[in-house]
Image (tube, rainbow, N blue to C red):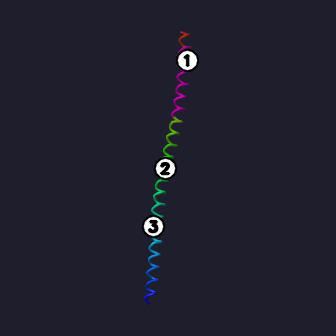
């Protein structure tokens, strides 16, 4: 009977060790997941900023072209006056 109790204690100890190991593994995986989620969010924000910059650059270019066209029109109108 003592032998069976000892074996059960050993088995319980092994199971507890495995559970502790799996718990540690789960914590590590959760930490890695949180880190990667933050990194994905950062990358998404960077992409959004790049898109905003591209749109702003396009708008600026359009405004510059419009200014040039208006300046040419002003110059032409001055010559006709």
In the rendering, at what x and y percent does residue 65 appear?
55, 25
Please provide the residue range marked out in magenta. Answer: 56-75
Task: Please provide percent x and percent y for residue 57.
Answer: 53, 32
Identity of the residue drawn at 45% across and 87% down: 3
Compute the Cα span from label 1 to label 3. 74 Å
Question: Quick one: label 2, few (<14), some, or many (20+) residues within 10 Å?
Answer: few
- Depth check: 70 or 12 in front? 12
Q: Nearer the viewer, residue 69 or 14?
A: 14
| Residue lying at 45% horizontally and 67% vertically, measured from the top left | 23
What residue is at 45 percent from the left and 82 percent from the top?
8
Q: Quick one: label 2 or label 1, which is nearer the N terminus?
A: 2
| Element type where label 2 sits in the image | helix
Which disc number belongs to residue 23?
Answer: 3
Camera-side residue: 62 or 50?
50
What is the distance, in whole Å, between disc 2 and disc 1 at their CAs? 51 Å
What residue sits right under mark 1 in the picture?
73
In which quadrant of the rendered view does residue 69 lie?
Answer: top right
Judge the density around disc 1: few (<14), some (14-19), many (≥20) Cα neighbours within 10 Å: few
As drawn, 72 above or below 4: above
Majority secondary structure in the magenta region: helix
Q: Earlier in the sequence, mark 2 or mark 3?
A: 3
Look at the image and say whether residue 20 sits in the magenta stretch: no
Q: Is residue 15 above or below residue 53?
A: below
Task: Give whichever of 20, 1 is nearer the camera.
Answer: 1
**To which residue does mark 2 refer?**
39
């Amino acid at each position: 009977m003592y032998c069976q109790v000892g074996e059960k204690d050993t088995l319980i100890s092994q199971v507890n060790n495995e559970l502790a190991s799996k718990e540690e593994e789960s914590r590590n995986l959760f930490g890695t997941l949180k880190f990667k989620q933050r990194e994905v969010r950062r990358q998404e924000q960077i992409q959004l900023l790049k898109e905003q910059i591209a749109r702003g650059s396009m708008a600026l270019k359009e405004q510059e072209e419009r200014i040039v066209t208006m300046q040419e029109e002003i110059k032409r109108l001055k010559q006709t006056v």
